[in-house]
């Protein structure tokens, strides 16, 4: 009997529970959810176990066969033994953005969380692929790569898939077409200086720049860059439906080995790093994602205007990486 693959999701908040739900609904893998307990007065709740049970019952109601389990862990790292034999470990745990917060505001607190989780992944699931979602994602992916000691192909961050989905949504709305026919990449840091690649974007094979005037394209680019903040201002917390679906798109490529070309935050160095002007940190570029993780980094062509935007985006990530490196050093020296 062939055993089903295992996807572990650390962090059962809005994004994590929706990742678990969609992964199970698509029958991609058995799912293990991990989350800390919640205390209300003298009462201690274990919401992760309740969410897993609720999903299991939903799957039964929909005649879907998939195993979903929830595990309560401590902030100090106790209770992670069920990570064993995980094929993919998704890290969504961390503090969410609140109105007025930048992604960089989350840096120090979320580095501490990532450090604890990664140490447990190393201990119990050393052969897994790490899929990082926690913001600021380019920095957290870099931190996970450095602290895990995993090869670069087995550490990826989810950013460009979501940014590209937002971009495609706005283009499709403007043109009155299906987003399935909008082909576009958004690369760079997952922040306000991300880079939509207009020069290679098309709708049904027709170049996007031939379908929309530059002023309208600039409006769409601006809305894409601040798409996360728009939802934060409307809901009071970060988005979760689209981010979870974007994560599951990556999970499917990893589990099924489909070799999808997806924009992901990955560690750049060597030949690819030279092409992109990045040496030794993580930023979003198109990659071939398959059963071995990142199987190839795609060198996407950019026109001069896009290359300048790319350089600004990279510089923004680089500055935050330098701050994170100091924090990692301080943590490891204690």
Image: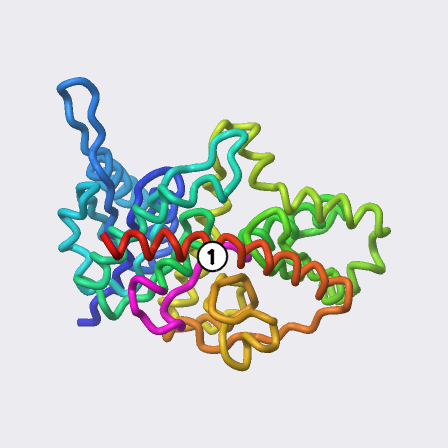
Image position of 91 (left or right of 176): left
Q: Nearer the viewer, residue 190 or 186?
A: 190
Image position of 280 (left or right of 11): right
Q: Nearer the viewer, residue 127 or 206?
A: 127
> x and y percent of residue 98 in the render?
47, 31
Q: Residue furthest top?
A: 41
Q: Residue at x 29, y 58 (%)?
A: 7
- How many numbered discs, if any? 1
Q: Residue at x 50, y 43 (%)?
A: 103
Can you say whether 52 is above or below 255 in the image? above
Where is residue 153, by image quadrant?
A: bottom left
Q: How is the image coloured?
A: rainbow
Which quarter of the rendered picture does the N terminus lie within? bottom left
> x and y percent of residue 212 in the render?
83, 52
Magenta region includes residue 99: no
> x and y percent of residue 116 in the render?
24, 51
Where is residue 60, by image quadrant?
A: top left
Can you say whether 232 is above or below 126 in the image? above
Helix, strand or loop status at disc 1: helix
Q: Residue furthest bottom?
A: 271
> x and y percent of residue 231 in the render?
56, 34
Where is residue 56, by image quadrant?
A: top left
Q: Magenta region: which residues?
A: 146-161
Residue at image mark 1: 322
Q: Residue at x 19, y 33 (%)?
A: 46
- How many other residues sit within 10 Å of disc 1, few (<14), some (14-19) or many (≥20)? few
Q: Nearer the viewer, residue 14 or 102?
A: 102
Magenta region includes residue 147: yes
């Amino acid at each position: 009997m062939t055993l089903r693959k295992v996807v572990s999701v650390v962090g059962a908040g809005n994004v994590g529970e929706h990742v678990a739900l969609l992964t199970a609904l698509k029958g991609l893998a058995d799912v293990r959810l991990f989350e800390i307990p919640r205390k209300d007065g003298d009462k201690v709740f274990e919401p992760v176990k309740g969410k897993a049970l609720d999903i299991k019952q939903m799957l039964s109601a929909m005649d879907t066969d998939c195993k979903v389990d929830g595990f309560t862990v401590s902030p100090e790292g106790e209770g992670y033994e069920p990570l064993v034999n995980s094929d993919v470990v998704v890290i969504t745990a961390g503090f969410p953005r609140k109105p007025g917060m930048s992604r960089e505001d989350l840096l120090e607190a979320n580095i501490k969380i990532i450090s604890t989780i990664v140490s447990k992944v190393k201990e119990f699931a050393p052969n897994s692929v790490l899929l990082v979602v926690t913001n600021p994602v380019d920095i957290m992916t870099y931190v996970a790569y450095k602290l895990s000691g995993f090869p670069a192909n087995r550490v990826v961050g989810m950013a460009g898939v979501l940014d590209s989905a937002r971009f495609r949504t706005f283009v499709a709305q403007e043109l009155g077409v299906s987003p399935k026919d909008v082909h576009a990449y958004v690369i760079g840091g997952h922040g306000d200086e991300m880079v939509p690649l207009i020069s290679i974007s098309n709708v049904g094979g027709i170049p996007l720049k031939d379908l929309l005037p530059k002023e309208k394209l600039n409006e769409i680019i601006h809305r894409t860059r601040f798409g996360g903040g728009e939802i934060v201002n409307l809901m009071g917390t970060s988005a979760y439906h689209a981010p979870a679906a974007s994560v599951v798109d990556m999970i499917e490529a990893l589990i099924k080995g489909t070799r999808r070309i997806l924009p992901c935050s990955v560690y750049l160095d060597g030949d690819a790093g030279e092409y992109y002007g990045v040496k030794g940190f993580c930023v979003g570029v198109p990659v071939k994602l398959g059963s071995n993780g990142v199987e190839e980094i795609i060198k996407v062509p950019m026109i001069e205007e896009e290359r300048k935007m790319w350089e600004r985006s990279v510089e923004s990530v680089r500055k935050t990486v330098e701050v994170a490196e100091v924090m990692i050093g301080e943590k490891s020296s204690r």
